C-alpha cells in the first residue's frame, strides 16, 4: 500500500471522527432555564388615591434626581457617579466578571503552544586506574555525554460534545449580567443616599432660618418686656420668662449646626472627597416635592436591578447543573504535536529530525467514590437556594413599594392637617401678642402660644423632610432610572 493511500485512509478517519463529534455537539446536557413561577399581584395594595402622571410628567429614566429641580444636587450626583470609591470597587468587580466570560469563551477554541529546549545528559561508571596510573580503555568508553535539541508545536482542542463548555459559558454570562445589575443597584442606592442626605440638609437650612427668625422675634419680646417692666406695667417674672425663652431657642439654633455639618461631611464622602474640601452654602429655596408615576408590579420586576441580579444568578446556577451532569460523559480532545528533535545543533532543524503525532483522546472517569454525584447534588441545591433568594427579592421589592406608597399617602394627609394647625397657631400668636401689648393677658400666656407656634413650624418642616425622603425611597424602590446595561 502506498504512502498516499495510508494518508488518505487516516484523513478519512479523522474527518469521520470530526463529523461525528460535531453532530454530537448539538447535544447539550442539563436543564434549559425557565423563570421560576411567581405570584405577581395585578396592582399595589396602597395604590388607591394615586393617579399616574401624564406622559409629559413621567419619571426621568436616567437622571431621576432632576425631578427635584436643584442644579446643585444634579452637580453633586454627577460627581458621585465619577468619584465614589465604593462604586469604583463595584465597577472593578464588574470588569472581573466580564473577563471570566472571555475566559469561558476561549475554551471553545484550540489551544496552541510551542516549546524549545536543550538538554545535556551523561551516563557511565567509575574510571578504574591500572598499574601505570592510567584509566583503562574499557572504563573510559563506559561513560558518555550527549546533547539533545528539541523544537515542537503542540495543539489541543476539546470538543464540546455534551455541552459542558456551553453551559459553563452560559453560567459565566449570567454571572456577568448579575454583576452588571449589582453595579446598577449599588449606583442607584448611592444616588438615593446622596439625594436623601442633600434634601435633609436643605430642610435643616429651612429650620435654621426659622429658628433664627424666632430668635429675633423673641429678642423683640424681651425688649418689650423690659420696657414694660421699667415702666412698672409688668412684673420682673415676665422679663425672666422672655429671657429663658430666648436663650433656649438660641441653643436650639446652635444645635442644628453640628447636624448640618455631619450631613455635609456625609455628602463629601459620597462624592469621593475629604470633608474639608466640600462646603455647601445655605439657600432659602427648598427642592420641590415631585409627582411620581407608579409602575405596575410586572414592570417593577424589569426595572429593579437587584431583582434582575437575583434572577441572573438563578440562570447561572441552572447552567452549573448542566456542567455537573456533563461530568458523567467522556471528554474528547483532539491533539497534535510536531517539531524537530536532534543531537546536533548544526543539523537540528532538518528533515530527518522531524517528528509529528496526531490523534484523539477520549477520557472518562470510571470510579470517583461518588464525587460527581455529590457535585450534582450541590449544584441542584445551589439552584434551589438562588430560586428562593430570587423570590425573596421580588417579595421585598413589592413590600418596599407598598411601604413607601402608604407612607407618602399618609404623610400627605398629615401635611394637610399640620398646615391647618400651623395656620391656627400663627393666628393665635398674632392675637395673643396684640392682647399682651394691650395689657389684657400676662406674658406666661404669650410664652405658651409662642412655644406652640414654634413647635408647629418645626413639625411642618420635619413633615416636609419626611415626605421628600419617602419620595426618594419610592423612586429607588421603583427601580430609579435603571434601564439595564447593554451586554457586549
Image (cartoon, rainbow, N blue to C red):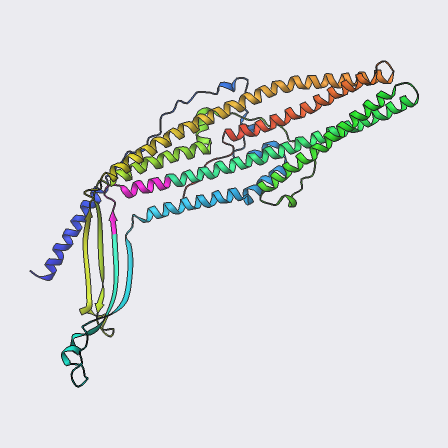
Q: Up-down: is 114 above or below 218?
A: below
Residue occupying image coordinates x 76% and y 18%: 449
Q: Residue furthest right?
A: 231
The magenta span reads 157-173
Q: From this view, report whether residue 175 is shown above or below residue 421.
A: below
Residue that lies at the very extreme toward the top in this rendered image: 440
Position of 361 with respect to 468 (left or right) is left
Query: Where does the image place residue 49, in percent across and percent down from the top left?
Result: 55, 17
- The answer to whether residue 284 shows anywhere in this view is no
| 435 vs 98: above or below | above
In the depicted view, which residue is nearer to us: 294 or 243? 243
Q: Is residue 237 left or right of residue 184?
A: right
Is residue 160 covered in magenta?
yes
Which residue is nearer to you in this view: 355 or 5? 355
Specify the farthest residue to the bottom.
132
Residue 316: in sight, yes or no? yes
User: Where does the image place residue 140, in percent across and percent down from the top left?
Assistant: 17, 78
Task: Please tell me which residue is depicted at 34% across the width and 40% down the height of the picture.
Answer: 171
* Above or below, 269 relative to 468: below
Q: Residue at x 16, y 75 (%)?
A: 142
Q: Is residue 150 magenta?
A: no
Amino acid at each position: 500500500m502506498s504512502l498516499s493511500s495510508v494518508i488518505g485512509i487516516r484523513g478519512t478517519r479523522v474527518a469521520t471522527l470530526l463529523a461525528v463529534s460535531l453532530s454530537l455537539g448539538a447535544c447539550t446536557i442539563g436543564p434549559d432555564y425557565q423563570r421560576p413561577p411567581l405570584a405577581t399581584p395585578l396592582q399595589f395594595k396602597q395604590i388607591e388615591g394615586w393617579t399616574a402622571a401624564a406622559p409629559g410628567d413621567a419619571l426621568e429614566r436616567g437622571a431621576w434626581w432632576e425631578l427635584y429641580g436643584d442644579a446643585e444636587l444634579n452637580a453633586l450626583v454627577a460627581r458621585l457617579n465619577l468619584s465614589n470609591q465604593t462604586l469604583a470597587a463595584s465597577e472593578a468587580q464588574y470588569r472581573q466578571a466580564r473577563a471570566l466570560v472571555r475566559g469561558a469563551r476561549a475554551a471553545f477554541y484550540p489551544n496552541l503552544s510551542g516549546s524549545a529546549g536543550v538538554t545535556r545528559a551523561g551516563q557511565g561508571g567509575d574510571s578504574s586506574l591500572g598499574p601505570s596510573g592510567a584509566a583503562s580503555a574499557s572504563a573510559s568508553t563506559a561513560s558518555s555525554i550527549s546533547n539533545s535539541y528539541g523544537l515542537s508545536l503542540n495543539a489541543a482542542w476539546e470538543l464540546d460534545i455534551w455541552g459542558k463548555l456551553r453551559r459553563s459559558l452560559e453560567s459565566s454570562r449570567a454571572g456577568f449580567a448579575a454583576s452588571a445589575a449589582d453595579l446598577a443597584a449599588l449606583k442607584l442606592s448611592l444616588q438615593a443616599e446622596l439625594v436623601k442626605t442633600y434634601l435633609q440638609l436643605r430642610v435643616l437650612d429651612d429650620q435654621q432660618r426659622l429658628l433664627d427668625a424666632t430668635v429675633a422675634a423673641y429678642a423683640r419680646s424681651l425688649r418689650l418686656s423690659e420696657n414694660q417692666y421699667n415702666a412698672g406695667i409688668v412684673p420682673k417674672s415676665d422679663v425672666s420668662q422672655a429671657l429663658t425663652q430666648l436663650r433656649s431657642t438660641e441653643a436650639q439654633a446652635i444645635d442644628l449646626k453640628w447636624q448640618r455639618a455631619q450631613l455635609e461631611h456625609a455628602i463629601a464622602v459620597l462624592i469621593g472627597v475629604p470633608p474639608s474640601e466640600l462646603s455647601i452654602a445655605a439657600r432659602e429655596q427648598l427642592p420641590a416635592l415631585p409627582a411620581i408615576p407608579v409602575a405596575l408590579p410586572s414592570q417593577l420586576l424589569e426595572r429593579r436591578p437587584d431583582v434582575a441580579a437575583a434572577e441572573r444568578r438563578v440562570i447561572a446556577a441552572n447552567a452549573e447543573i448542566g456542567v455537573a451532569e456533563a461530568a458523567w460523559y467522556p471528554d474528547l480532545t483532539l491533539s497534535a504535536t510536531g517539531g524537530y528533535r536532534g543531537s546536533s545543533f548544526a543539523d537540528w532543524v532538518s528533515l530527518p529530525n522531524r517528528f509529528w503525532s496526531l490523534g484523539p483522546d477520549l477520557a472518562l472517569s470510571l470510579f470517583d467514590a461518588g464525587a460527581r454525584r455529590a457535585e450534582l447534588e450541590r449544584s441542584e441545591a445551589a439552584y434551589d437556594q438562588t430560586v428562593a433568594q430570587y423570590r425573596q427579592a421580588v417579595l421585598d421589592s413589592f413590600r418596599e413599594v407598598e411601604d413607601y406608597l402608604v407612607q407618602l399617602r399618609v404623610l400627605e394627609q398629615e401635611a394637610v392637617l399640620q398646615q391647618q394647625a400651623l395656620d391656627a397657631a400663627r393666628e393665635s400668636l398674632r392675637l395673643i401678642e396684640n392682647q399682651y401689648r394691650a395689657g389684657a393677658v400676662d406674658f406666661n400666656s404669650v410664652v405658651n402660644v409662642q412655644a406652640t407656634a414654634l413647635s408647629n413650624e418645626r413639625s411642618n418642616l420635619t413633615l416636609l423632610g419626611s415626605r421628600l425622603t419617602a419620595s426618594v425611597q419610592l423612586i429607588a424602590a421603583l427601580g430609579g432610572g435603571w434601564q439595564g446595561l447593554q451586554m457586549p
